[in-house]
Amino acid sequence: MSYKNHLDFFVKVFLLIGLILQVNSKLYSQADSTGMRGLTSLEITAEMAPGINLFNTLDAICTWCTNNKNGLGSETVWGNPFTKPEMIKAFADRGFKTLRIPVTWYNHMGAAPDFIIDTAWMDRVEEVANFALDNNMYVIINLHHEDLKSGRPGTWISTTYEKQEAVADQLEKVWTQIATRFKDYNDYVIFETMNEPREVGGTKEWEGGTAEHREVMNALNLAAVNAIRATGGNNESRFIMLPQVGANVASALDALVIPNDDPNTIVSVHAYYPYWFTIGGGTDKWGTATEVRALENAFAPLSKKFVANGIGVVMGEWGAGNQDNYDQRINYYQTYTNICKKYGITPVTWIYDFNRKTLTWENPLIEEAILQAYDSTFILAEDLTLDITSDTLFVGETLQLSATIFPDTVSTKEIGWVSRNGDIASVNSKGLITAKSRGTVK
């Protein structure tokens, strides 16, 4: 090569700094539990934190199959492997306390008037739930991609007056079957009436719906709760999560009605906020004082209306997609989790960096940013030094970096290595830099 490529780098290592302490008044385990323990909504949601979703798995749909009817193979049609016990054990070993299992049922059930769920599918849902229960995790089971959608035969949940009666009837019959299967399970099993019920493509679909949609949603929640309670057994007092339209925070604050003033209920909300940073792709940066304040202002009212009145709140979906902005995501996850904890909201992340095929955490500081808030023994790094702070490389050359973390008693010594411009120089998970093209990069 005729020229020397100057690579002036500062490999930034993003750390979560400080020692986080937590005191819990009660601790329970699945092994200690023989049934329903009489916990309050706030006690059980405190125990559930933090949680993680088994996304794009039992909720996956084979839309190209005849009439959208799927067998057990639907579990893998969206690219995830068949769920095995060791995958769920990895979640539990990492420190997550709850597994939310999104489940789509319409493609595994018969027609009206009985809507009989395929026995093999019910068995599989129960099997995966037991993978989590065997690891002392809470389990959330819901109805996921059921919302009525044009061109998708079998979808059925609608929040309109016109369809309310028919939807309530099917909701009762579906939940009666699910609840009956799990009626003898203890209170580590939690039901969620629906996922993000809404009018697909309708007015204010993602803005909390219309007054009609919200009123119908309250009626549908009531139908589901009554059906679950009527199955008896432990379902008479099982905790049930309740969303409003779209699981929207604003619709929950403005319109959610707790069916029968049932004390064993939990508010279910989702917040990919701010949208353009988390999943919208409009910006890869987040974290100004104004942005943090906006996030806090979005969550504080949930605490004031529900938590302060003894009703638990679960943030059942949240997270930020990878835009090659590892440092920004770490900051976001830590801030989001700490705000949830401050206001008594249980975070259950949808977006994380676990590879289920290799059973590896590919960007471990993302998950550490969540877990640090809920582990009283967790010691975070206070400082770090690099053996090299700048150098010059030819294109194609490599350089191995080494870092020393202080104190040496930190809970994790895994480091997130990031290049600000991977086209000029890349850095792998072990700190190995490779010069790619001419330029300067940090």
Image: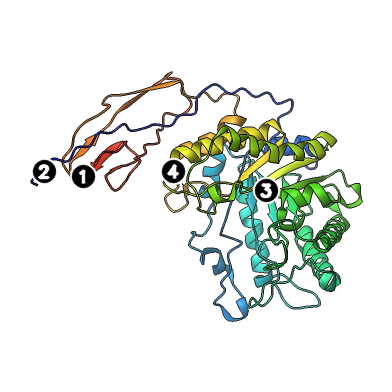
Residue type pointed to by label 1? Arg
**Residue 157 or 394: which is nearer the viewer?**
394
Residue 3: numbered disc: 2
Q: Where is residue 421 in the image (x, y as percent from the top left)?
A: 33, 44
Identify the residue shown where x is 86% and y is 71%. 165
- Marks 4 and 3: CB-CB under 8 Å? no
Q: Mark 3 points at which residue?
A: 139
Disc 4 or 1, which lies upstream in sequence? 4
Q: Name the residue under label 1.
A: 438
- Marks 1 and 2: CB-CB under 8 Å? yes
- Circle 4: is it few (<14), some (14-19), or many (20+) Cα within 10 Å? some
Q: Name the residue under label 4.
A: 325
Kindly state the secondary structure of the residue where label 2 is placed.
Answer: loop
Residue type pointed to by label 3? Val
Disc 2 or 4, which lies upstream in sequence? 2
> Which of pointers 4 and 1 indicates the residue nearer the eye?
1
> Which of pointers 1 and 3 indicates the residue nearer the eye?
1
- Circle 3: is it few (<14), some (14-19), or many (20+) Cα within 10 Å? many
Residue type pointed to by label 2? Tyr
Measured along the vertical axis of the image, is residue 70 above or below residue 266?
below
Residue 277: numbered disc: none
